[in-house]
Amino acid sequence: MGFKEILPSEIEKESFRIIRKELAEAGVVIPPDVEPTVVRVIHTTADFDYADTLLFSENVMGKAKEAIRKGAHIVTDTNMALSGINKKSLAGYGGEVHCFMADEEVAKEAKRRGVTRAYVSMERAAEIDAPLIFAIGNAPTALASLHKLWQERGFRPELIIAVPVGFVNVVEGKELIRRMDVPYIKNTGRKGGSGVAAAICNSILYNMDI
């Protein structure tokens, strides 16, 4: 097989075509409302396991798009995810993207309390006066913080994207989100990451009209 010459503008389109072709050949049928998200995550990771392991709460896409139309802000737990989310598309609906992980006050508070910066970052984010979507791709402690805010304060985001990657409390953190009365997109198991979190956000932003 030789190297295939293809225009830069066509690479993503061809990648999506290949992904959909291979899914069809494997007999994998994905519900139409979540198919763009699954395909974009596979495109980001080259990992077809996501076709089986991504889980979506009922009508989550409709709820997420409605939140964005209402001017929802997106909060991430890494600057990598912050960089990857299409801020221009979100701004078109009045939203912004936030990450408080590098905030000096967050770092001081986390050290004083003996918790992670991600844990405190979620508390800081909960104070934003706007509908909120959380895109967590790295820190399960961020999910624990959101769960506690829900339990103790009745805090209810518009959506939680729970896809942290790793080995410690990752599976358990994702399970906490499933138990909450909050729309979610989550991945089972240890896989995930900032790129996956950003890809999920972008899949919603790029398909607002469907």
Image (cartoon, helix red, strand yellow):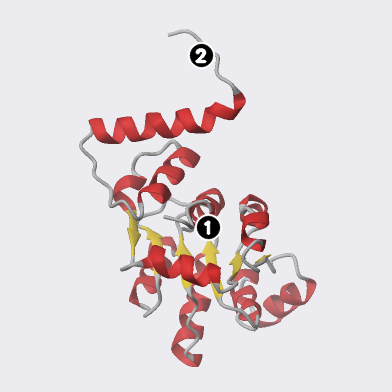
Image quarter of the C terminus: bottom left
- The amino acid type, in three-letter code, at marker 2 is Lys
The residue closer to the viewer here, 109 or 77, is 77
Which residue corresponds to the image point at 44% horizontal and 65% vertical from the top-left? 169
**Which residue does the numbered mark 2 point to in the structure image?**
4
Which residue corresponds to the image point at 33% horizontal and 67% vertical from the top-left? 59
Does residue 198 appear left or right of residue 170 in this picture? right
Q: Position of residue 161 (x, y in %)?
A: 47, 63
In the image as oriented, which residue stretches furthest toward the bottom? Answer: 153
Which residue corresponds to the image point at 46% horizontal and 67% vertical from the top-left? 64
**Which residue does the numbered mark 1 point to in the structure image?**
137
Q: CA distance from mark 1 to mark 2?
A: 33 Å
Does residue 30 appear left or right of residue 85 in this picture? left
Which residue corresponds to the image point at 47% horizontal and 70% vertical from the top-left? 66
The residue closer to the viewer here, 148 or 80, is 80
Q: Is residue 6 above or below residue 67?
A: above
